[in-house]
Amino acid sequence: MSEHQHDDNCGCGEDHEHEEHVFVVTDDDGQEREMVMVYTFESENNVYAVLLDRNDPEADGVIFRIEEEGEESFLVGIEDDAEWDRVTAIYEEIARTENGQE
């Protein structure tokens, strides 16, 4: 029996193009939340990811820096105030542009 290989034309009914990238993130209160990566962008040679709470998509998104070690990628919290201000300003501009609020 061969293993099913998912791709755009496999016909299995799954929406492969919109597959969610889900991460379990522990918040400041120690609560685990399932977060979905909804957007990535670059700034000053770093890549950032915007994640939304899978169970509360209306809540504000959270921005993490993506760091790579070899073949592995990690989400890292942004602790530097200047970096945080810079990336939130970039994301807010992107959100305004995508929502047609220029």
Image (cartoon, rainbow, N blue to C red):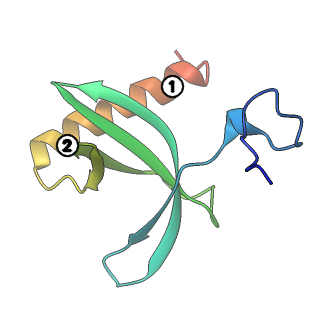
Name the residue type under label 1: Arg
Q: Earlier in the sequence, mark 2 or mark 1?
A: 2
Badge 1 is on which residue? 96
Q: Quadrant of the N terminus?
A: bottom right
Residue 90 location, quadrant: top left
In the rendered structure, find residue 31 and report the number of the disc placed on it.
none
Viewer-closest of 102 and 7: 7
Q: Residue at x 78, y 39 (%)?
A: 15
Q: Seen from this angle, which residue lies furthest front?
A: 1
Q: x, y (%) of residue 102?
A: 52, 15
Of helix, strand and loop, which one carries label 2? loop
Name the residue type under label 2: Gly
Of helix, strand and loop, which one carries label 1? helix
Q: x, y (%) of residue 91?
A: 38, 32
Image position of 31 (left or right of 55): left
Q: x, y (%) of residue 13?
A: 89, 42
Q: Residues within 10 Å of mark 2 (few under 14, many from 20)?
A: few
Q: Residue at x 82, y 44 (%)?
A: 14
Residue 22 location, quadrant: bottom right
Mark nearer the viewer, 2 or 1? 2
Badge 2 is on which residue? 70
Q: Seen from this angle, which residue lies furthest bottom?
A: 30
Q: x, y (%) of residue 34?
A: 53, 67
Viewer-closest of 84 and 12: 12
